[in-house]
Image: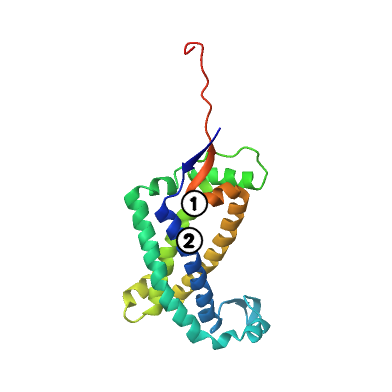
Amino acid sequence: MKIIREKHSLVMRWTHWINFPLLGIMIWSGLLIYWANDEYQISISGHTFFHFFSQRFYDVLKIPHRLSEGMAFHFLFMWFFTLNGIFYTFYTLISGEWRSLWPQKSSFREAWLVLLHDLHISKCAPPQGKYNAAQRIAYSAIILMGAGSVLTGLAIYKPVQLSWLTWVMGGYHLARIWHFLLTLGYVLFFIIHIVQVILAGWNNFGSVVSGFEIASKPVKTISHEEE
């Protein structure tokens, strides 16, 4: 027997869908800033073994000339990104949602089992509540990554006024590296998250839109004593 039950609250859904385009704009505008001074590469003895983008990439998109555009968008939308993240974090704490979101002691072991199941290596899926073990780890990590992006971003944005924060982050150059690595982490999270949504099916995606999911109701068996 199928039943419809509530899975995600309105606040959880709104903050999720608002954060998706905000993070996209932050990554895009941040890359415009990075492309204006593309200094990260793997070099040994003056020989470059790896570079993220080729010169042809810059010539086609005329990216080095869009620094002011990237800074304008980045410094504007960072406030919306930060406020949305703070509101989401406080809501999970006040509402108690953190209990179903934060990893448990067994989460890291069960996350491996989730991976094997998603890769169709194992037929048995580990027990799952509102979120499985892999989702608990990923969604909690993205909150910590968001906090890291805000702190490293402020250290880069105001290195003189917030010199103490820049010092805590290891200096301006190291703070910029951490900020860039977090951006790569978001891209990786996006890819994994979309793959997980596809594997989970329409019912899971629909619950993030509507807040409800279709679930199977256990059938109660009647014993001889009840008869």
- Residue at image coords 34%, 72%: 165
Q: Is residue 28 above or below residue 212?
A: below
- Residue at image coords 33%, 77%: 163
- Residue at image coords 62%, 53%: 198
Find residue 106 and report its horizontal and vertical position in percent.
48, 42
Q: Residue beneath label 2, please?
A: 17
Amino acid at circle 1: Ser
- The label on residue 210 is 1
Find residue 76 and report its horizontal and vertical position in percent.
41, 77
Return the residue nearer the eye: 174 or 55: 55
Query: Picture quarter containing residue 64?
Result: bottom right
Q: Secondary structure at mark 1?
A: helix
Q: Secondary structure at mark 2?
A: helix
Q: Is residue 223 above or below residue 53?
A: above
Amino acid at circle 2: Trp
Asked if one can make out residue 170 in the rendered structure from this viewpoint, the answer is: no
Which of the two marks, 1 or 2, is nearer to us in this view?
1
